[in-house]
Image (cartoon, rainbow, N blue to C red):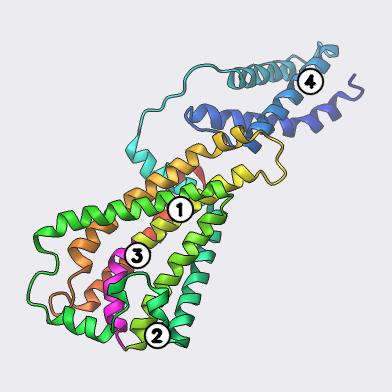
């Protein structure tokens, strides 16, 4: 029973406004999937509005408030109990300019964690090589990286043949396939509650840190920067995004005190996980092309400053894209 009608309206109006905002968002984008906390909030607001509508029966002389609440409850009921299949038509431009970058930012806490794990590995690998240069035969799993950096640079800069040649398309495809496989594996390791994902990225960081430190200590900083930056500026973030997807999956499995069934938690993050993995795969296609057709050419064919500048521009462009794309439309 309502004792003070004006006080009742003032107290409940914020909840009605919140419900209207959520419904407007859902109606604007019929393909949007709500996260579990959002679903719970929508259900709570719907129940509260329904209860308020019942309580208004004692005030037949307030038709405007009653009409507003009836319309609101009807909209909420239709949204919650909707059985129509949502459109899954692919909209590439919208996906690139809005869906992927906003999904990335919404899950930025997971990205921060994978970056931290990778940087820890980088520092560990660099310190291991700085402390004992001979440790690279143990730290680096690839034989072509365990040799003398200066000898490698002298060989690459003295080559008169095309380092890739007619094999460039095949080499590029092999790079794409390998890196995409690593990215999907990083995501799949989310089933270990994210622990496996972090371990994988930590070891990848060790290899990166060891290689860079080895070449820097040998005085070949320009070579290693020109070699790694053009493709690494996109390849490394792409693998990190794959790890980000793994942590999103791991968090959903872990629950962290959420009593919602595991199947519902996983379903709630499924679209985000898929979006992140597809985005990472697209980045890796670009990285594979650059590595095969650009990164493998060194001085005097391609000056290092050109390669370093190109890689730096890629980093800036990728940072701006992930930070700003879609913000005007969704205020993400």
Q: Nearer the viewer, mark 3 or mark 4?
A: 3
Q: Nearer the viewer, mark 1 or mark 4?
A: 1
Which SS type dominates the magenta stretch? helix
Residue that badge 3 annotates: 233
Left or right: residue 30 versus residue 309 is right
- What residue range appears in magenta? 219-234
Q: Position of residue 319 (x, y in %)?
A: 41, 60
Against 136, residue 114 (above or below) is above
Q: Position of residue 205 (x, y in %)?
A: 45, 68
Residue 310 lies in the magenta-colored region? no
Q: Mark 2: few, some, or many residues within 10 Å (few <14, many ≥20)?
A: few
Q: Mark 3: few, some, or many residues within 10 Å (few <14, many ≥20)?
A: some
Q: Nearer the viewer, mark 4 or mark 2?
A: 2
Q: Mark 4: few, some, or many residues within 10 Å (few <14, many ≥20)?
A: few
Q: Nearer the viewer, residue 7 or 294?
A: 294
Could you say whether the residue bearing mark 1 is in a helix, strand or loop? helix
Visible in this render: residue 178?
yes
Q: Nearer the viewer, residue 34 or 66?
A: 34
Q: Nearer the viewer, mark 2 or mark 3?
A: 2
Q: Position of residue 143 (x, y in %)?
A: 30, 73
Q: Nearer the viewer, mark 1 or mark 3?
A: 1
Q: Earlier in the sequence, mark 2 or mark 3?
A: 2
Contact flag, marks 3 and 4 (Cβ < 8 Å) = no
Residue that badge 4 annotates: 51
Could you say whether the residue bearing mark 2 is in a helix, strand or loop? helix
Residue that badge 2 annotates: 134
Against 271, residue 125 (above or below) is below
Name the quadrant containing residue 232: bottom left
- Checking the image for residue 186, the label placed there is 1
């Amino acid at each position: 029973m309502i004792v003070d009608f004006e006080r009742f309206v003032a107290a409940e109006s914020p909840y009605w406004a919140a419900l209207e905002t959520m419904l407007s968002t859902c109606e604007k984008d019929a393909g949007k999937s709500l996260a579990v906390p959002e679903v719970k909030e929508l259900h709570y607001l719907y129940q509260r509005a329904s209860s308020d509508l019942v309580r208004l029966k004692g005030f037949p002389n307030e038709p405007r408030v009653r009409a507003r609440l009836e319309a609101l409850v009807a909209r909420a009921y239709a949204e919650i109990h909707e059985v129509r299949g949502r459109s899954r038509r692919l909209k590439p431009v919208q996906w690139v300019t809005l869906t992927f970058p906003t999904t990335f930012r919404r899950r930025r806490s997971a990205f921060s964690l994978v970056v931290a794990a990778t940087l820890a590995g980088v520092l560990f690998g660099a310190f291991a090589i700085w402390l004992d240069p001979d440790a690279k035969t143990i730290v680096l799993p690839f034989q072509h990286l365990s040799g003398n950096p200066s000898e490698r640079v002298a060989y690459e800069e003295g080559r008169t043949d095309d380092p890739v040649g007619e094999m460039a398309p095949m080499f590029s495809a092999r790079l794409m396939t390998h890196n995409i496989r690593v990215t999907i594996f990083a995501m799949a390791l989310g089933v270990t509650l994210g622990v496996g994902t972090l371990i994988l990225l930590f070891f990848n960081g060790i290899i990166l840190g060891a290689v860079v430190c080895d070449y820097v200590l040998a005085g070949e900083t320009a070579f290693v920067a020109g070699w790694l930056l053009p493709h690494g500026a996109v390849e490394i973030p792409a693998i990190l995004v794959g790890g980000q997807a793994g942590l999103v999956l791991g968090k959903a499995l872990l629950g962290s005190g959420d009593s919602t069934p595991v199947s519902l938690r996983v379903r709630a993050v499924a679209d985000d996980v898929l979006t992140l993995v597809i985005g990472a795969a697209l980045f890796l296609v670009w990285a594979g092309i650059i590595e095969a057709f650009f990164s493998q050419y060194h001085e005097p064919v391609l000056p290092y400053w050109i390669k370093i500048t190109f890689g730096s521009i890629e980093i800036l462009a990728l940072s701006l894209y992930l930070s700003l794309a879609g913000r005007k439309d969704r205020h993400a």
